[in-house]
């Protein structure tokens, strides 16, 4: 199996897992995809239940080969049960299925932070020869499935919501709200990263292609913490995505979002900062409107200069019918644009020093020849080195793109 | 195996890569178990770090880009040539050419070269190990820039002898583990001109090779020495050596400076593109060395700890990682491996101290 | 209590000296303190003693100002650090409430 095929399967599984949070049908698609990708005859996916009654629930099963012995399904259950209840995994185990048929089995519990969240079973024809590459890939798949099923558990509430779980749930609403996939826009490389703090913060990042093929970038922060913040973030996202389909100018989009959210936000001590930018890839122009958010940082790769693109505007919910300003900037090749939350510049080390804007600029300068993904990875590492063993207080999230 | 700084090395640890002296003699063989005496001796010789076999990390194969035999041969010939330069200014060119050729051939036969090893050497014999490593790094960069064999050989020879002028300087200017005084600095800067004078008089020696010695401290923006040349006026081999020279000095801990991790050295070089260095050279160089070399201990965003076991040219910040401990710090038995290139949701958040 | 509010009232003018932390745990205390003010026409919120303020705290200040203004009370925010003012500025608070509401901005760190 080649690397690209492996990548393909993993990406498909990951994106199906995101879909599964809204539509359980996606689990069946995952099992189907695993069969075809790994050459398995049958695949099943199980959920561990913590409530009373049964300890497991089958999310999906797919049989890629016709006329499999009917006993296989029962055996599948037993194996999954062992995986979930005893944490037992089987690798290339030969099992008798039906009267005189044998099959090879891989069964594994899905573990997330040492907690069993489910199980996966893969059945192969007895003559299947699999090298180490496949096992490695199965390992990666299991890892992703575990996280995906864990997320699903909290979205669907299958395990019975309890108050103590609410914060965790909110955190997962947030994770689920990150864009499923990064749009492919001509002439730029693009990356975003989020390191969530233990508690729920209100950082919000979104990325999409608008109807007229521009790149829409939204960053925001719900000022306030916990469940209300996560809910407001979800509402903001819906409001912005809807407005972005109707209006083509960032200022008009923010005005629409403000019109929609103002009645509920006004007079509360929660408010939402939001910045919306549009990038036009042909002329390389960035348009921007701002509702009380930190200005984006633009690093000019050619000259080594940087600037903050400051556009004044009040936060969402501040004033009814507020008119936002529109700004634009012409970008050039090798320019890097960074949208970030205050968690980035205010990340604190053991001595209480903040990371600060200057160090952010340094990281961009020191990595300017790399593409966005590498620059983003490096920024995370520099932040991580700075924070060290100190507890991360706030969400750290950012989005950057580089004109290639 | 992984690199461990000398102050974190303990008796009982097993050396997994030999340490060589100036003329290629073995100071400490691979497989030797360290004793307090060995450690003390290595410190006296100015060895700053060792490659150590680590049970917990498990077996890691780190291949050098050229064979040990060739590296040692190059070391020996460089030392001979430099030692003899005062007495007998005729370099044995045939030997030099042959070893440079060997390096070039080995590098060319190697697809997708990526440097995962930091050259570990004794500070007392710094110049020779440095010269050989700079030659190798320069050649890899030259290959990335599309150089043909003939050009590569000139680049290799120039790189090998870029510091030949050092042998004509008074001892006390070199081997200092403190910043040089103004006067010493002036004297030190003379090594460029001195080297050039020696090399240009040699028969059958290309003048462009001698220019590497003269110009490898010139800077893109014209702030270098000795002639404050700028941009395109700087010899193209010297432009490459300017970069690889600094990279090697930073990662090996030169002049009493603490050793930089490869990613830090690389960042410094990138930050100085169009100031000290030609952007073209930097761009080609940065893809030839591993940002997080095999053996680097890291922490992932999942709070798991692991070690880099494989690096990919296309994904410099996303190596393959062997996960050694879970988020609670519990050892993972048996450890499993994770390709960050295949797991977009995972990333490295920290580089852990080499000594831990 | 992490937040202390000392109130000085002279004639129809009240000064509220805020000392300590203004965040999710103390913000209600501020709002109660403000709503309890009776018979004044002017209120100064003195932030000189505030050691830490988070987004909820900023929200609280904005809400306090709004409530007071609804009661036709003239509000000023005084002795605010330059750093904190910058955050207020990015959020657009001066634009909402008027720049004249802020007095005596202190240079240096908060």
Image (cartoon, rainbow, N blue to C red):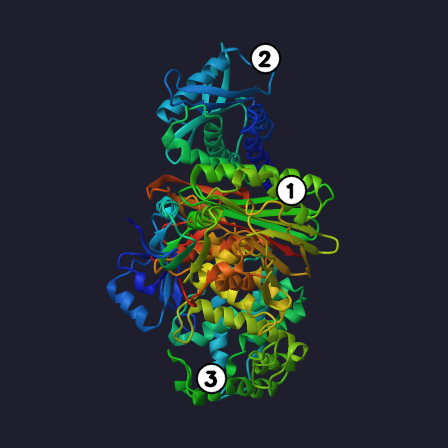
Q: Is residue A13 positioned above or below A249 on the image?
A: above
Q: Which mark is residue A151?
A: none
Q: Which mark is residue A67?
A: 2
Identify the chain of the residue marked 3, using the numbered disc in the image: B
CA gap, disc 1 and disc 2: 58 Å
Q: Quarter of the image holding residue B110? A: bottom right
Q: Which dot, 1 or 3, sits closer to the camera? A: 1
Left/right of residue B282 with respect to residue C66 in the rendered view: right
Indicate the secondary structure of the residue bearing disc 2: loop
Where residue A141 appears, as percent x and y from the top left, is: 51, 34
Q: Which mark is residue B167?
A: 3
Q: Categorize mark 1 by other alpha carbons within 10 Å: few (<14), some (14-19), many (20+).
A: many
Left/right of residue A64 with respect to residue A135 in the rendered view: right
CA gap, disc 2 and disc 3: 81 Å
Identify the chain of the residue marked 2, using the numbered disc in the image: A
- In the foreground, A393 or C76: C76
Q: Quadrant of the N terminus of chain A?
A: top right
CA gap, disc 1 and disc 3: 74 Å
The residue that disc 1 covers is A256
Q: Which dot, 1 or 2, sits closer to the camera? A: 1
Indicate the secondary structure of the residue bearing disc 3: helix
Q: Is residue A239 visible?
A: yes
């Amino acid at each position: 199996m080649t690397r690209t095929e492996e990548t393909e399967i993993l990406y498909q599984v990951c994106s199906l897992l995101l879909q599964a949070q809204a539509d359980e049908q996606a689990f069946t698609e995952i099992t189907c995809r695993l069969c075809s990708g790994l050459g398995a005859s049958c695949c099943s996916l199980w959920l561990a239940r913590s409530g009373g009654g049964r300890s497991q629930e089958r999310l999906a099963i797919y049989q890629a080969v016709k006329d499999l012995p009917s006993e296989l399904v029962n055996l599948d259950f037993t194996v999954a049960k062992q995986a979930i209840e005893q944490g037992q995994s089987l690798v290339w185990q030969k099992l008798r299925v039906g009267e005189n048929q044998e099959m090879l089995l891989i069964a594994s519990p899905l573990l997330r932070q040492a907690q069993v969240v489910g199980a996966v079973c893969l059945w192969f024809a007895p003559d299947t020869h699999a090298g180490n590459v496949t096992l490695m890939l199965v390992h990666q798949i299991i890892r992703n499935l575990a996280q995906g099923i864990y997320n699903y558990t909290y979205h669907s509430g299958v395990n019975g919501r309890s108050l103590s779980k609410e914060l965790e749930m909110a955190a997962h609403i947030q994770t689920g709200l990150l864009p499923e996939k990064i749009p492919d826009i001509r002439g730029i490389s693009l990356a975003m990263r989020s390191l969530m703090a233990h508690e729920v913060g209100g950082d919000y990042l979104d990325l999409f292609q608008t109807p007229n093929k521009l790149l829409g970038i939204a960053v925001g922060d719900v000022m306030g913490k916990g469940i209300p913040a996560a809910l407001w973030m979800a509402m903001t996202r819906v409001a912005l995505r809807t407005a972005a389909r109707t209006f083509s100018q960032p200022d008009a989009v923010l005005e629409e979002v403000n019109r929609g959210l103002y009645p509920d936000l006004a007079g509360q001590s929660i408010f939402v900062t939001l910045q919306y930018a549009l990038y036009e890839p042909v002329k390389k122009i960035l348009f921007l409107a701002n509702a009380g958010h930190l200005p984006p940082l633009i690093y000019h790769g050619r000259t080594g200069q940087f600037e903050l693109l400051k556009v004044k505007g009040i936060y969402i919910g501040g004033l009814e019918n507020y008119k936002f300003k529109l700004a634009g900037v012409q970008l050039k090749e090798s320019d890097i644009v960074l949208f970030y939350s205050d968690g980035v510049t205010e990340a604190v080390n053991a001595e209480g020093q903040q990371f600060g804007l200057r160090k952010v600029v340094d990281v961009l300068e020191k990595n300017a020849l790399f593409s966005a993904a590498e620059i983003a990875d490096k920024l995370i590492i520099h932040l991580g080195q700075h924070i060290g063993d100190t507890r991360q207080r706030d969400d750290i999230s950012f989005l950057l793109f580089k004109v290639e | 195996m992984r690199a461990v700084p000398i102050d974190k090395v303990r008796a009982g640890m097993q050396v997994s890569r030999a340490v060589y002296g100036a003329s290629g003699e073995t100071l400490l063989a691979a497989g030797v178990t360290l004793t307090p005496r060995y450690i003390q001796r290595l410190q006296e010789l100015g060895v700053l770090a060792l490659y150590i076999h680590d049970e917990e990390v498990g077996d890691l194969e780190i291949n050098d880009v050229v064979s040990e035999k060739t590296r040692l041969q190059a070391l020996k010939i460089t030392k001979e040539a430099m030692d003899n330069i005062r007495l007998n200014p005729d370099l044995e060119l045939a030997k030099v050419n042959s070893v440079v050729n060997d390096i070039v051939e080995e590098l060319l036969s190697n697809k997708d070269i990526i440097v995962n090893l930091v050259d570990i050497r004794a500070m007392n014999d710094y110049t020779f190990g440095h010269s050989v490593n700079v030659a190798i790094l320069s050649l890899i960069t030259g290959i990335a820039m599309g150089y043909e064999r003939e050009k590569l050989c000139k680049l290799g020879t120039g790189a090998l002898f870029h510091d030949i002028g050092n042998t004509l300087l008074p001892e006390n200017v070199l081997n200092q583990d403190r910043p040089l005084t103004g006067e010493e600095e002036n004297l030190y800067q003379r090594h460029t001109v001195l080297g050039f004078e020696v090399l240009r008089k040699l028969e059958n020696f290309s003048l462009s090779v001698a220019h590497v010695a003269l110009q490898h401290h010139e800077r893109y923006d014209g702030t270098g020495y000795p002639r404050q040349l700028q941009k395109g006026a700087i010899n193209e081999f010297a432009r490459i050596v300017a970069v690889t020279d600094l990279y090697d000095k930073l990662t090996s801990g030169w002049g009493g400076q603490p050793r930089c991790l490869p990613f830090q050295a690389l960042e410094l070089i990138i930050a100085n593109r169009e100031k000290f260095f030609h952007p073209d050279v930097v761009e080609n160089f940065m893809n030839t060395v591993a940002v997080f070399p095999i053996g680097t201990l890291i922490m992932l965003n999942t709070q798991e700890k692991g070690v880099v076991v494989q690096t990919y040219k296309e994904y410099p910040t996303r190596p393959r990682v062997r996960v050694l401990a879970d988020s609670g710090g519990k050892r993972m038995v048996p450890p499993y491996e994770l390709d960050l290139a295949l797991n977009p949701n995972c990333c490295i958040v920290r580089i852990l101290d080499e000594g831990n | 209590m992490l937040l202390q509010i000392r109130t000085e009232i002279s004639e129809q003018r009240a000064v509220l000296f805020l000392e300590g932390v203004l965040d999710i745990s103390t913000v209600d205390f501020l709002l109660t303190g403000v709503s309890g003010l009776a018979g004044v026409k002017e209120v100064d919120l003195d932030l000189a003693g505030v050691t830490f303020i988070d987004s909820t705290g900023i929200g609280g200040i904005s809400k306090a100002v709004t409530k007071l203004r609804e009661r036709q009370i003239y509000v000023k925010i005084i002795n605010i650090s330059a750093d904190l003012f910058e955050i207020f500025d990015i959020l657009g608070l001066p634009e909402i409430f008027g720049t004249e509401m802020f007095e005596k901005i202190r240079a240096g760190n908060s």
